[in-house]
Image (cartoon, rainbow, N blue to C red):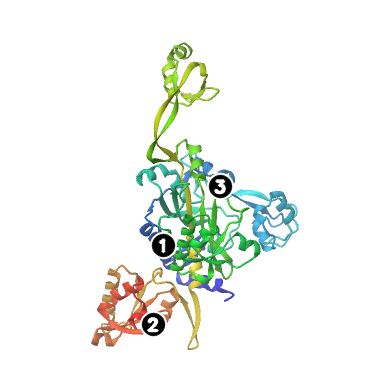
């Protein structure tokens, strides 16, 4: 389907999945509203993610503010370097991302080119908006963060967070105590992030407000063997490594064990979360044939990262779309926040057996300090005792003033000590999920059309686990007590914690089509036979097959079908 995007978006708007935001005022690019079915689909995807990371992996969820003070983003590097290269058309005054224009004209590696190189390349290229050339305009950096102020009349600068990760990093000390000071441990967060995109023209693929689901897993820098690696060791995942990209080859279909042992993936932690992500995407409804993992090339990977992979999903209009990033970020983030805040961001790792060592200790010479520092002498001596000596002296801080104490004012003594362990700054493994992009991909991959008796049947083949409506209850007629029986069944289904929809409007065939179009996996029809034998018709969306079953067993059967304990074929 060449126009799959248009068909999916038309259905999504008509059926209440996704709408333009503030449409009555003309809407704003880069923002969307989730309608009743879209909001439910999104929650279902998020809850599957929670099942993977919280219920199974054992990482607890936290929730941090979406606005952070400036110091957080100075430390993270966002204030200085979170920018895209932008150019403004001198004719129509529209703004454009320089790399997008390069991509549209087949110019490779635009992300790595300098501002001057891009200005020269773009000057003879046409503006996408007005077709005039960019000659006369220069490419420059545009910071993508939304800036605000905190408090009335305050000069305290804040930013809408560009990612959810920083809140987990700044909570590191408290999380460490929560996990009883032991590695490895992790925390997860699902929430809104904001990026002031230059020209978002890709619908749900590029938004200015979007939902991220991120896990930050803190591990010992020298121990990157995942404790549960065997769970995914034999899982085959399509990997498009650096070599495959350089020679234009197809992705390798290999196991995670082979990927780690051959050095394609840096370590078991990265491989484990690549495989888990593959499992998650397929569980949510992505087509396995349209999912692959691409390794970041050396010139695009962050300088501090050991390894980084993107989960890419194939779209009919947008090609391969990055939806998840899995990276070994080493200790970059914790080191940056430690430097900015002054906190340690380390974990004390006890040795199996204490070690003997020698320690240098400063002993202040009070006879020399007293006359020199008078009333501050004791404070200077205390600070000096806690400091470390250097060849030039010992630096201390008194009342915010840094003072260098020369060696002649103290004595350095060595003494034997027992070393029980060491302070280690953990490395961070980060799987980061773009929920909105995943949701769109599932909409597109689930969409299908077929001709049924001369009529187009549109279906969303959602897995029952993420379907916004899991069952439809349809009385054949809205009279003769069929509606009363149907409403009773509806109530029992809802008591199982399932999402059901009651529909008594129109011909039964039309009602089936409505439910197929919103992805409802199962339908229960109450007819006149129900009054006689207490059975109903249970219909499967994908096969359109129907069976009769006892009405009082329907809630339990639906629960088992949706949880994957049984299949519709088992019932047949």
Which residue is identified by label 2? 506
Tell me the SS state at disc 3. Answer: loop
Question: In the displayed structure, would residue 412 be above or below residue 298?
Answer: above
Q: Which residue is mark 3?
A: 304
Note whether residue 285 is visible. Answer: yes
**Quadrant the C terminus occupies:** bottom left
In the picture, measured across the screen, residue 211 lies left or right of residue 534, that is right
The picture quadrant where one finds residue 353 is top left
Q: Earlier in the sequence, mark 2 or mark 3?
A: 3
**Whole-number angstrom distance, CA of label 1 to CA of label 2:** 49 Å
99 up-or-down from 481: above or below:
above
Q: Is residue 108 above or below residue 491?
A: above
* Distance from the alpha carbon under mark 2 to that under mark 3: 61 Å
The span from disc 1 to disc 3 (Cα, nearest Å) is 29 Å
Residue 231 is tagged as 1
Q: Position of residue 281 (x, y in %)?
A: 47, 65
Which of the pair 534/109 is nearer the observer?
109
| Viewer-side residue, 223 vs 477 | 223
Q: Is residue 179 above or below residue 36?
A: above
Label 1–label 2 contact, CB within 8 A: no
Numbered tag placed on residue 366 in the rendering: none
Q: Secondary structure at mark 1?
A: helix
Q: Is residue 154 visible?
A: no
């Amino acid at each position: 389907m060449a126009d799959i995007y248009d068909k999916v978006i038309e259905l999504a708007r008509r059926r209440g999945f996704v709408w333009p935001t503030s449409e009555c005022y003309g809407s704003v690019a880069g923002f969307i509203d989730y309608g009743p079915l879209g909001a439910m689909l999104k929650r279902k995807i998020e809850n599957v993610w929670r099942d993977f990371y919280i219920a199974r992996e054992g990482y607890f969820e936290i929730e941090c503010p979406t606005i952070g003070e400036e110091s957080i983003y100075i430390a993270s590097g966002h204030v200085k370097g979170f920018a895209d290269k932008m150019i403004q058309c001198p004719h129509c005054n529209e703004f454009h991302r320089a790399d997008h224009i390069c991509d549209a004209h087949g110019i490779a590696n635009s992300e790595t080119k300098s501002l001057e190189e891009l200005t020269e390349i773009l000057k003879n290229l046409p503006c996408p908006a007005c077709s005039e050339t960019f000659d006369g305009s220069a490419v420059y950096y545009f910071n993508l963060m939304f800036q605000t102020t905190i408090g009335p009349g305050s000069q305290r600068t804040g930013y809408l967070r560009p990612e959810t990760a920083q809140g987990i990093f700044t909570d590191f000390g408290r999380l460490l105590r929560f996990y009883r000071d032991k590695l490895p441990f992790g925390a997860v967060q699902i929430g809104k992030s904001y990026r002031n995109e230059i020209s978002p023209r890709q619908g749900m693929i590029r938004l200015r407000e979007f939902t991220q689901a991120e896990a930050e897993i803190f591990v010992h820098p020298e121990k990157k063997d995942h404790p549960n690696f065997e769970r995914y060791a034999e899982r085959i995942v399509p990997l498009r490594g650096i070599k495959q990209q350089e020679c234009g080859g197809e992705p390798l279909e290999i196991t995670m064990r082979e990927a780690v042992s051959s050095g394609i993936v840096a370590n078991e932690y990265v491989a484990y979360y690549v495989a888990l992500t593959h499992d998650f995407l397929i569980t949510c409804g992505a087509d396995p044939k349209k999912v692959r993992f691409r390794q970041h090339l050396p010139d695009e990977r962050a300088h501090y990262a050991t390894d980084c992979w993107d989960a890419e999903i194939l779209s009919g209009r947008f090609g391969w779309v990055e939806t998840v990033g899995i990276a070994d970020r080493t200790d970059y983030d914790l080191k940056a926040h430690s430097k900015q805040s002054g906190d340690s961001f380390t974990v004390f790792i006890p040795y199996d057996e204490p070690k003997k060592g020698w320690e240098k200790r400063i002993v202040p010479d009070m006879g020399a300090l007293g006359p020199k520092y008078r009333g501050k002498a004791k404070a200077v001596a205390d600070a000096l005792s806690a400091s470390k000596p250097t060849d030039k002296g010992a630096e201390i801080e008194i009342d915010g003033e840094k003072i260098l104490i020369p060696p002649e004012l103290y004595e350095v003594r060595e003494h034997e000590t027992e070393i029980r362990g060491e302070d280690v700054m953990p490395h961070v493994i980060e799987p980061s999920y773009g929920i909105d992009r995943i949701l769109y991909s599932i909409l597109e991959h689930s969409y299908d059309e077929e001709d049924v008796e001369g009529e187009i049947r549109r279906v969303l083949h959602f897995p029952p686990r993420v379907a916004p409506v899991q069952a439809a209850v349809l009385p054949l007629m809205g009279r003769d007590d069929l509606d009363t029986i149907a409403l009773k069944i509806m109530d029992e289904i809802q008591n199982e914690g399932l999402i059901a929809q009651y529909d008594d409007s129109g011909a039964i065939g039309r009602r089936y089509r409505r439910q197929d179009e919103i992805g409802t996996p199962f339908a229960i029809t109450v007819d006149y036979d129900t009054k006689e034998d207490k059975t109903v018709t249970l219909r499967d969306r994908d096969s359109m097959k129907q069976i009769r079953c006892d009405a009082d067993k329907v809630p339990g059967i639906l629960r088992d079908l949706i949880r994957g304990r049984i299949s519709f074929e088992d019932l047949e």
